[in-house]
Amino acid sequence: MSGSAVRLEATVVGRVQGVGYRYFVRDVALGLGLGGWVANAPDGSVTCVAEGSRAALEAMRVQLERGPLGARVDAVRCVWLPASGTSERFEIRAGAHAGD
């Protein structure tokens, strides 16, 4: 990650599990060159943590709000932080993962 990298931690609420949402997020992130991960949460939401340029992460945020066909996104709660530099690639994690 470059020195201008930032971190987006997003919680996506709605009908976002069982509709291919995590795969959609992974494909978007890979296309934008972002590192990080996406996972289902026990409460039915999806958690996405991504690092990269602010512009790429803003594009990711727009896509998180849109979601794939079949999804219904009610809200995307975003927290912006400095990049940790620990996310070189983007992956789908199991729902039980505690994060990083």
Image (tube, grey):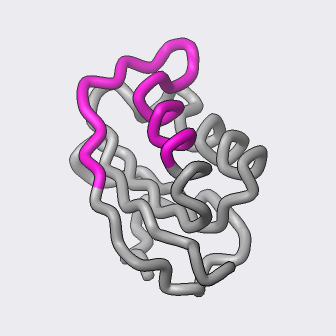
Look at 33% across and 54% down and name the residue there: 41
- The answer to whether 38 is drawn above or below residue 31 in the figure is below
Residue 69 counted in the magenta span: yes
Q: Is residue 10 magenta?
A: no
The quarter of the image holding the C terminus is bottom left
Q: Is residue 45 above or below residue 51?
A: above
Name above or below for residue 94 compared with residue 19: below
Q: Is residue 68 left or right of residue 41?
A: right
First to last magenta residue range:
58-78
User: Which quadrant would residue 17 be assigned to in this image?
Assistant: top left
Question: Looking at this view, is 45 or 61 the one in front?
Answer: 61
Instruction: Kindly identify the residue that appears in the image at 52 percent across and 57 percent down.
Output: 54
Choose between 54 and 21: the one closer to the eye.
54
Tell me which residue sits at (53%, 34%) in the image: 21
Tell me where residue 27 appears, x and y as whole percent. Answer: 72, 42
Residue at point 34% right, 24% down? 73
62 lies left or right of 79: right
Instruction: Please state if 83 lies on the left or on the right of 9 as rendered.
Output: right
